[in-house]
Image (cartoon, rainbow, N blue to C red):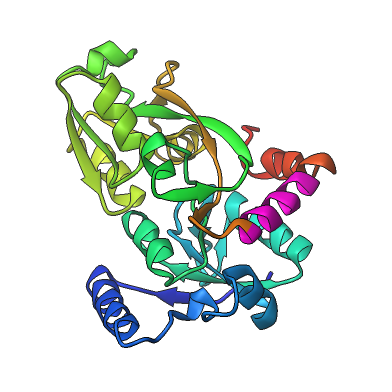
Amino acid sequence: MRKSILAVSTIVFILIFALTLAGCGQGSQPAASGGADKTVWEAIKEAGKITVGNSPDYEPFEYEDGEGNVIGFDIALLDLICKELGVSYELVNITFENIETAVQTGQVNIGMSCFSITPERELTFDFSIPYLSGGQAIAVNPDSGYTKIEDLHGKKITVGMGTSGMEAAEENIPGAEIIGMDNYALAFMQLKNKGCDAAVADLPVVRNYAAKDGFIVLEEILSYEDNAILIKKGNDDLVKAINGAIQTLKNNGQIDALIEEWLLEE
């Protein structure tokens, strides 16, 4: 599949935003905007490439394979979407909590990193039609004695910073100390080292870490959510194009095939 990875640290990322915004104040346009006479979608078609904010720390949705390649369900789906659109894609590696800013400021065209549709995000962004429905689940250590959500009231929970999992934990685990981590590898490492009582993530992610590290997955689900692609408001033609591609992949069964390949337990 076609990809190139641009590693961006949080500090450098913020500096880039500042310089970009300063340039816009002098009448320049962000590269993703396509200029005054082109929509973002028109600029993407002209360039033949779409830039995608992605945080590859969320196996099996997006993660590095050890050879410098980013793979996973979202990446395989992105590849199919881009083939439908007739463009290639460039992955821009950004911490999850910074992807929204990157989309909003035009540093990337879209965000695709297992984004859940939430009322808060819908105030600022448009979403594609959902490509997946899922939910937030909880992992605990096997010797913890925790078997249900109420056992975690007042306990220490790790979760990805700025994620819907953080919101779900805050809303559904009363009195818990919710600790936002820069990436999920750190969140689950804390759990493995017993620096916390539980970790929260999408169910396939929790199952993946449970299989590797021996965690127990609680049967109760914290929240049910739809996943979609994040798009800056005002780009209706881009939304329409992406929606058409996703609907085609739904209709021809290719999304179902990816779900079976990447997300279902053996």
Q: How many marks?
A: 0
**Residue farthest along the right direction in this orientation:** 252
Q: Is residue 252 magenta?
A: no
State left or right for residue 79 relative to residue 180.
right
Q: Nearer the viewer, residue 198 or 241?
A: 241
Can you tell which quarter of the image residue 89 is in?
A: bottom right
Instruction: Identify the image quadrant of the C terminus.
Output: top right
Kindly identify the residue that appears in the image at 39 percent across and 43 percent down: 123
* Picture coordinates of residue 87, whole percent (x, y): 71, 72
173 and 85: which is toward the camera: 85
Residue 59 appears in view:
no
Q: Height in image: 217 above or below 190?
A: above
Q: Which segment did they paint magenta?
A: 237-249
Residue 123 in view here: yes
Q: Quarter of the image containing the N terminus?
A: bottom right
Measured as percent of width and height from the top left, residue 197 is found at 22, 28
Estimate the x, y position of residue 143 in percent, counting from the top left: 28, 21
In front here: 21 or 208? 21
Q: Going by the image, does 87 lie left or right of 54?
A: right
Report if residue 245 lies within the magenta region: yes
The picture places residue 247, in percent across and down from the top left corner, at: 75, 44
Q: Residue at x 52, y 67 (%)?
A: 109
Where 142 falls versus 48 (above or below)? above
Query: Residue at point 40% right, 33% down?
Result: 214
Query: Which SS type dominates the magenta stretch?
Result: helix
Residue 203 vertical placement versus 59 (above, below):
above
Q: Is residue 131 left or right of residue 55?
A: right
- Quarter residue 237 falls in: bottom right
User: What residue is shown at x 74% (from left), y 51% (from top)?
Assistant: 244
